[in-house]
Amino acid sequence: MEFQVRLNKVEARVFGCLIEKAFTTPDNYPLTLAAVTAAANQKTNRDPVMELDEVEVARALDALANKFLARRQWPANSRVEKFSHNGKDAFSLEAGPLAVLAELLLRGPQTPGELRVHVSRMVTIDSLESLYAMLQPLIERGLVERLPPAPGSRAERYAQLLSPDVYPTGNKPIERSDEYAALQERVKDLESRLARAERQIVRLAEKLGMSLEALAQAGREDLDLE
């Protein structure tokens, strides 16, 4: 079963934060608008780092609530509205897969090794096999996809699909330095010179009435005499 929910970059960041903080700061959960904004702008465990104001975050929270991904709450003895995620019920996910989804929303495509390290701050992951078991329901629901290795790497990656435009998954071409470009030009020049030399040797052999093999043998004999 695939979910058709799509989030913009602010909604993706806010949704990821709501899931993350449910794991990492349960005593201070649900979150106030100010706390959600601070989490969204956090400089650690975020890529990219964002600078959102409360108006933008409030708009994202409204959108998430309309998509049944967030809840508004008025806890007892609280004078302000608070917010929590609804990911477990919306996607029928357990804690492990939810934590993986949050990490991919907050930091983009990652290898299994990176995910195991980063997600471990939210839930315990004993092995890569445990991580793959958490990824499986996300893939089955169309929330995560497997990507080929990045250029220069042999490790597969995984990316979330709730907001695919936030972290484009196409492999970018490798940028070439000026030194590399100069080397390419040098190789082309040498190849051109070699081709000219080969043509000159062919013409010389024709003038002498010799085959290329005979001409080469004569050249080797001259070198031996020297």
Image (cartoon, rainbow, N blue to C red):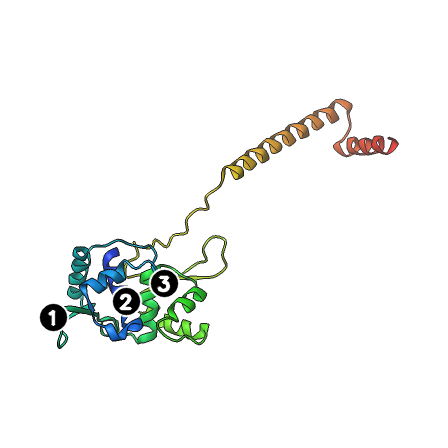
Give the side of residue 166 with respect to residue 206, left or right.
Answer: left
Secondary element under disc 3, as helix, strand or loop, is strand
Say which residue label 1 marks: 79
Mark 3: amino acid: Glu
Give the side of residue 161 with respect to residue 77, left or right.
Answer: right
What residue is shown at x 42% (from left), y 69% (from top)? 116
Mark 2: amino acid: Glu
Say which residue label 2 marks: 2
Residue 167 image point, x, y percent: 33, 55
Residue 190 image point, x, y percent: 62, 32
Q: Which of the two labelled residues, at mark 3 and mark 2, occupies the earlier sequence position?
A: 2
Residue 166 image point, x, y percent: 30, 54
Secondary element under disc 2, as helix, strand or loop, is loop
* Residue in front for this viewpoint, 8 or 190: 8
Q: Which mark is residue 23?
A: none
Q: Which of the two labelled residues, at mark 1 and mark 3, occupies the earlier sequence position?
A: 1
Say which residue label 3 marks: 145
Residue 169 image point, x, y percent: 37, 55
Task: Find the distance from the CA under tag 1 to the CA under tag 2.
Answer: 39 Å
Give the side of residue 195 with respect to residue 43, left or right.
Answer: right
User: Does residue 43 lie above or below 95 as drawn?
Assistant: above
